[in-house]
Image (cartoon, rainbow, N blue to C red):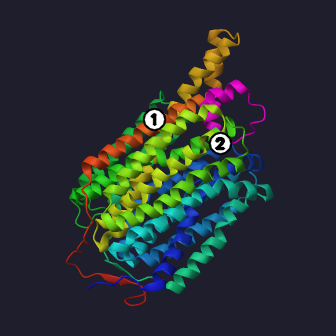
């Protein structure tokens, strides 16, 4: 039994519904960081508490992606999207209603974690719906719109957050409610029809992968706070990695696994996930590091730093549309390789210009780096999901999103360490040059670099001395140089690992699918 993709305008109504659904998850990746000082001041949160108000969301989002993908394939994609939207919107409302007093910290962290769980349910199911709504030859263009528009909302987060926070920081959470309402209405009107296969949930596998991802991502996230010399960091990462190894072993012996690990035997799926993993070491961290650079080195406000990032997404959105069409016409290899090369060149040029402390000198470097990421990201993600059976799109999406978030956490941790180390070295030299004794310069530089790394550049920049701005720009230059190297490695992997040509449709397994929607069984 098969279900044909939706026809005509209904496909694009489905696409619009799913973009609105996932828009909340993209916006919330960046919008909260802008309001951190206001939230901390009003609720009197500890430094650790305010950090976890940001990290709890990212941690649960990463830990439950695989579960969300599997759930969507087994109980229905539309049902899972609606459930995810309701959970996300409800948690957002509760975050905005955080009471003052002793319970504030626990309340906010808990509901941020619930937000992440809702996002983990919503995203794989929404992407699977888009994939199943479009024929294979049209998916590149459709998913280019999906990733281009939804990804562009990541840059809007800081800008929107800056303006909403001027009214009240609670509005950064409440803004999700009208977005959720539009997503639910469009979903009800478009009635997307997909296929699913009922199967028992692999709770043992869920516990292993959630625990493994959560522990290791927690270790990466805490590395800048506790320091890499802290044994607890390595214990968390090692324990997480061990649980993931056990997960793979257990899944191979499970009749109805959470993830069919044999899917990695599909060459293109494995290569595209490797390319995505490498590129995600750069793609998410660049938002944080460029925002810090804009606020510290250039002296921009938080909302101005958000505008700085919009130039990256000008290149990203335009190139993602071209890359999607290239995927439909000639396959994934050309746009993925081209994108990785352009991104490597863009980051290299950007690194060369950051020390000028002039945005006009960097503007087209930023656009080029964004265009490179746009060319490769959507085709790589689309091609990876296309390699799965239509009954496993949610599972494949859950895998790719887990890989992407895991790599992003690693990139933030490692490149953050590079930034702090380089900044500490340059600050020491600057302080010594000003006549500060070497030992005192070393301790002062260590303190300043660590405080700045933990604050994320969210405070006032009015009193930052010029030498600090210049030293921070040089440290950022080193980070961007490493980003260029990383994208060059991704290009080599794509050249060697991917095969040219347009993909043909993947056959489904010989099991009877269950339509998820109005034509075959109850939908939400």
Which residue occupies the extreme right position in the image?
Answer: 167
Q: How many numbered marks are there?
A: 2
Location of residue 389 with respect to 51 vertically, above or below: below
Which percent across, then down, holds residue 306? Answer: 66, 51
Q: CA distance from mark 2 to mark 1?
A: 23 Å
Label 1, residues with CA under 10 Å away: few <14, some 14-19, many ≥20: some
Whether residue 407 is visible here, answered yes or no, is no
Which percent across, then down, holds residue 435? Answer: 70, 9
Mark closer to the chain start, 2 or 1: 2
Which percent across, then down, holds residue 297? Answer: 67, 34
In the rendered image, which residue does mark 1 sit on? 482
The one nearer the camera, 413 or 106, is 413
Which percent across, then down, holds residue 335? Answer: 37, 56
Which residue does the image show at 56% across and 51% down from the upper left?
312
Horizontal side of 38 relative to 212 (left or right) equals right
Q: Which residues lie in the magenta part?
A: 450-473
Whether residue 445 is visible here, answered yes or no, is yes
Q: Are discs 2 and 1 less than 8 Å apart at CB? A: no
Which residue does the image show at 37% across and 89% down from the upper left?
520
Horizontal side of 218 relative to 390 (left or right) equals right
Location of residue 479 with respect to 63 vertically, above or below: above
The one nearer the camera, 196 or 243, is 196
Which residue occupies the extreme bottom position in the image?
Answer: 519
In the rendered image, which residue does mark 2 sit on? 360
Element under label 2? helix
Residue 466 within the segment the image draws in magenta: yes
Horizontal side of 319 relative to 262 (left or right) equals right
Element under label 1? helix
């Amino acid at each position: 039994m098969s279900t044909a993709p939706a026809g005509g305008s209904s496909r694009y109504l489905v696409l619009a519904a799913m973009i609105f659904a996932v828009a909340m998850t993209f916006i919330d990746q960046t919008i909260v960081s802008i309001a951190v000082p206001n939230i901390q001041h009003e609720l009197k949160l500890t430094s650790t508490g305010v950090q976890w108000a940001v990290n709890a969301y990212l941690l649960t989002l990463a830990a439950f992606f695989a579960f969300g993908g599997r759930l969507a394939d087994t109980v229905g994609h539309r049902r899972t999207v609606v459930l995810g939207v309701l959970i996300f919107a409800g948690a957002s409302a509760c975050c905005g209603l955080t009471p003052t007093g002793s319970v504030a910290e626990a309340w906010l962290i808990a509901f941020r974690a619930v937000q992440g769980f809702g996002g983990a349910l919503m995203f794989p199911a929404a992407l699977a719906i888009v994939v199943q709504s479009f024929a294979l030859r049209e998916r590149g263009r459709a998913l280019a719109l999906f990733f281009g528009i939804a990804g562009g909302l990541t840059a809007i987060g800081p800008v929107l957050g800056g303006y909403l926070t001027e009214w009240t920081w609670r509005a950064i959470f409440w803004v999700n409610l009208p977005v959720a309402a539009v997503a639910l209405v469009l979903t009800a009107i478009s009635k997307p029809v997909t296929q699913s296969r009922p199967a028992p949930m692999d709770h043992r596998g869920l516990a292993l992968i959630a625990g493994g991802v959560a522990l290791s991502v927690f270790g990466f996230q805490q590395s800048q706070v506790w320091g890499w010399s802290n044994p607890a960091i390595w214990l968390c990462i090692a324990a997480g990695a061990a649980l993931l190894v056990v997960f793979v072993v257990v899944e191979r012996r499970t009749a109805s696994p959470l993830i069919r690990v044999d899917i990695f035997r599909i060459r293109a799926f494995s290569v595209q996930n490797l390319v995505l993993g490498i590129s995600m070491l750069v793609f998410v961290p660049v938002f944080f590091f460029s925002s810090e650079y804009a606020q510290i080195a250039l002296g921009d406000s938080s909302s101005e730093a958000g505008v700085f990032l919009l130039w990256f997404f000008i290149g990203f959105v335009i190139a993602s549309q071209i890359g999607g069409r290239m995927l439909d016409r000639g396959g994934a290899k050309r746009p993925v390789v081209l994108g990785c090369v352009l991104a490597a060149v863009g980051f290299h040029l950007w690194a060369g210009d950051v020390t000028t402390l002039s945005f006009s000198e960097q503007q087209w470097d930023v656009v080029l780096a964004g265009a490179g990421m746009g060319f490769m990201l959507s085709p790589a993600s689309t091609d990876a999901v296309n390699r799965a059976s239509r009954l496993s799109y949610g599972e494949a999406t859950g895998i790719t999103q887990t890989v992407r978030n895991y790599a992003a956490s690693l990139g933030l941790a490692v490149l953050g360490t590079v930034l702090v180390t380089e900044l500490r070295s340059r600050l020491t030299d600057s302080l010594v040059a000003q006549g500060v004794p070497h030992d005192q310069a070393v301790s002062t530089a260590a303190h300043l670099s660590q405080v700045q790394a933990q604050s994320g550049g969210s405070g006032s920049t009015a009193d930052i001395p010029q030498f600090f701005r210049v030293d921070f720009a040089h440290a950022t230059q080193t980070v961007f140089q490493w980003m260029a190297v990383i994208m060059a490695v991704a290009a080599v992997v794509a050249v060697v690992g991917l095969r040219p040509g347009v993909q043909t449709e993947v056959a489904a397994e010989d099991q009877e699918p269950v339509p998820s929607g109005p034509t075959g069984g109850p939908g939400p």
